[in-house]
Amino acid sequence: MEQENKLFQEVNGGYTMLEAINEAKRCLHCKIPQCKKGCPISHDIPDWIHELSMGNLGNAMNIINSKSNLPAVCGRVCPHEKQCEGHCVLNKKGQGIRVGKLERFIADFDGDMGLIRENLLPKTRGKIAVIGSGPAGLTIAGDLARQGFNVEIFEMEPEPGGVLMFGIPEYRLPKDIVRREIKKIEELGVVFHCNTTVGNDELTIDKLFELGYDAIFMGTGTGRPQKLEIPGSDLKGVRQAIWFLRRVSLYNEGNMSRDEIVVHEGDRVFVIGCGNTALDAARTAVRIGASHVEVVYRRTINEMSALHSEYEEAVEEGVKFSWQSNIVEIHNDNGRLNEVVIECNGERRTEKADFVIMAVGSAPESRIVSTTTGIDVDDRGYVLTREKPYGMTTRKGVFAGGDVVNRPSTVVLAMRDAKQVAEGIAQYVDAMKLMESINKGGELKKPEDQK
Ligand code: FAD
């Protein structure tokens, strides 16, 4: 266990204070910052980098807080090379500013030192239920709590965080970092109810309205993995990547035994797909002791959705890649998976195998929409929402955002969507309360007030 824990240690180190300040000093503080254009939540990047370059970490953190509830997470897992860093003008002269590492440095420093104490508004504007505590739910909760709403989160897992806690592995995103970000949201007055599923006999959307919530947000993600139907895909040795990653995460936290991980030391593992989830599963299989891990992808290297840097790290760790290839058959010996047949350019080869992991996408669960009326979804189960108020579903007062609406994407895109939905919810609740008070007759101004 100790040996394995070491393997799950974070792979990319952070900056020291000296390194961070030196990197910050390289920023040109451009008048029209391209990095900000490249950031989905339009972070005021040059402003907080400038504060950092002068050693003002509290000011830097305050600027970051005004746009993001999860900077220590984004600093680690955002696709920076395609976003802020990729847009930095210094790329033309060599190396762009390492924005992600700087954001991570400031957020970690604030986490260690507890620099910021926010002034909180009294929670008088309304009561909001948030279902799901992934990046979308956490963002809504943080934004609305800061604006004076009473927010409670309902999460079916034993701990909040969504994919941040049970998907992205420890070596890329340490769970203590996620917990620290969540604690900051809790300190804004947000209440968490874990082990609480919405959409069963006890708790439904209708029940939440009966309990007095003014609006409900669904940030329930895409927890239903897609399956490839190939001969042998029903064998026990074929598992879903998110199932596997969740188990390893529970094991790393001491909440599951090694036997329950199913992949054994020395196993030969084949992973289907080449996105974030596939590479996380492959690199996790290496860490858990598999002797051969091969990613089988039907397209080319240029078409994979995983980041190139992640691919390079996977190669360094020993993961093999087969491009333009498909697993077309999975064989067994007395019910135990023992071979895969891989086809590439019309040629077939048979490989000894113990385990096949599928990472070919996911879709929303229907738990909530099937236990209530009025929430329309498309033919794949994604929730339909309105432009005005932004994020409201076809049921009045129920909003949705993040992956359950937009398809599996990224942490920061789920956050961006959720930030807009938070505005939609605030507008809706304010308007409803105003109409209520008018309908009740409202209080009339006294003559002296009207001057
Ligand atoms: P989720 O994070 O899925 O959260 C949904 C939450 O809702 C979960 O906690 C779930 O338990 C809860 N829930 C669902 N139904 C109910 C219910 N009925 N009642 C109560 N609770 C419920 N993105 C990046 O930017 N960088 C990466 O490196 C990256 N790596 C990834 C690796 C993996 C393995 C995966 C699966 C995804 C990765 N992503 C990455 C994508 C990113 O994590 C998602 O886009 C993001 O988490 C979506 O956020 P969300 O809040 O919409 O949903």
Image (tube, grey):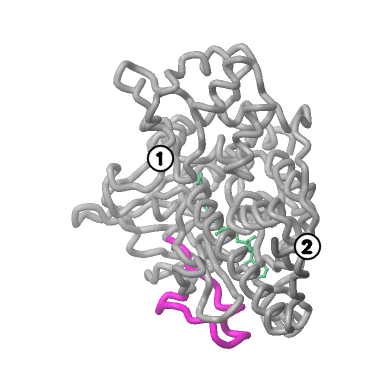
Range of residues picked out in magenta = 361-381
Mark 1 near ligand 1 (CB under 8 Å)? yes
Mark 2 near ligand 1 (CB under 8 Å)? no
Gap in Å between the C-alphas at discs 1 and 2?
44 Å
Give residue 124's mark.
Answer: 2
Residue 204 or residue 195, whichever sits in front = 204
The residue shown at (60%, 68%) is: 218
Earlier sequence position, callout 1 versus callout 2:
2
Q: Is residue 378 magenta?
A: yes
Hey, what amino acid is under mark 1?
Leu
Residue 39 or residue 193, whichever sits in front = 39
Residue 50, x across and y down, in percent: 54, 21
Quarter of the figure with the N terminus: top right
| Looking at the image, residue 236 lies above or below residue 189 | below
Residue 375, x across and y down, in percent: 53, 81
Give residue 307's mark.
Answer: 1
Quadrant containing ligand 1: bottom right
Is residue 102 shown left or right of residue 253?
left
Q: Is residue 9 magenta?
A: no
How crowded is the residue under tag 2: few (<14 C-alpha within 10 Å), some, or many (20+)?
Answer: few
The residue shown at (42%, 75%) is: 380
